Amino acid sequence: MARAAAVTSPTPRPAPLADRSEAVLSRLQLLVTRKLDGLLQGDYAGLLPGPGSEAGESREYRPGDDVRRMDWPVTARTTTAHVRRTVADRELETWLALDLSASLDFGTGQWLKREVVVAAAAAITHLTVRGGNRIGAVIGTGGGASAPVRRWRGRPPPPGPGVLTRLPARSGRKEAQGLLRAVAGTAIQPGRGDLGALIEMLNRPPRRRGVAVVVSDFLAPAEQWARPMRKLRVRHDVLAIEVVDPRELELPDVGVLPVVDPESGELHEVQTADPRLRQRYADAATAQRATIAAALRGAGAAHLRLRTDRDWLLDMVRFVAAQRHARTRGTTR
């Protein structure tokens, strides 16, 4: 399905996020703190359970559990399959893979898709930075798989086409704020990105076991990024955050609509008054999203979808609450 954005916007857009990053990040910090602090009880404050090394209690096996954590003595004694819980390490390392390719510079809802990416990064950083946990990031701005890799040392990297940036994992709120400023200040570059190459940056070099979060619209072909996602899941707990705009799911009836592919620059005129065209578009979008969901499920990643026309923070709160409930339900012995 083509990635298309309207050439003209019906309403004026605010200044680019990079120009108002400090104000936006301050507002995001307040929003995230108010809504997510109530969920941060206990030793571990992450979105997903960390793969700890200390053995904990056992509980009954549920479909989807890692069979490598089977508790065979308890299983033999009770004749019911059990898995051994592990206590999350106090210091957890979390890595973000943030897709800021040209297709993210689009939005018809309350937010641009790239703004949702930055907001999600701020929420995840707030959830994981406590207790001495470390957080780092890799950022892709488009330009193809042959893009050079740059390391960030103290200041955000200068913008350039096809740059893949690695921000080292560090602990502390000051370092986390610096990471978010670097993310918010990263300029989106023209050209197609390689989501698979971005995710592969989390696989090489091998990192200590932890949490990996991939934030993207996942519009690249699934065969490009599915295998790196599966490799990532072997060593880490993986969360995939899919950013969606409503116009990517259905077209409005607005007559002739000029649209442009933000990555290739191709311009098309679409007659949206045709109900059959709108239905074909909706069907293709539904099939595309089903393919994305199936690929993420096949990779073993937790899947969170955020939309530009909804309260992304409320959706994230519900997701965190559901993850915590899933970790605590079940029989323990």
Image (spheres, grey):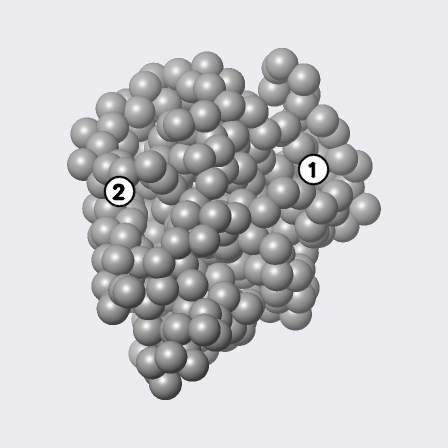
Task: Decide which of 301, 163 is in the foreground and name it.
Answer: 301
Q: Assess whether mark 1 and mark 2 are in contact (beta carbons under 8 angstroms).
A: no
Q: What residue type is labelled 1?
A: Leu
Out of 96 and 54, give the one closest to the viewer. Answer: 54
Q: Is residue 329 visible?
A: yes
Q: Residue 53 carries which label?
A: none
Q: Is residue 286 above or below residue 116?
A: below
- Residue 236 located left or right of residue 27: right
Instruction: Assign the C terminus to one quadrant of the image.
Output: bottom left
Q: State the residue at coordinates (56%, 53%).
A: 236
- Which residue does the image show at 39% across and 16% down from the upper left? 22
> Mark 1: which secondary structure?
strand
Q: Where is residue 115 in the image (x, y as percent from the top left)?
A: 40, 37
Q: Where is residue 30 in the image (x, y as percent from the top left)?
A: 25, 24
Q: Which amino acid does label 2 sit on?
A: Leu
The residue that label 1 is drawn on is 164
**Category of crowding for the residue at label 1, using alpha-carbon neighbours closer than 10 angstroms: few (below 14), some (14–19), many (at least 20):** many
Tag of residue 313: 2
Residue 110 at what x, y percent from top left?
28, 42
Q: Is mark 2 on a helix, strand or loop?
A: helix
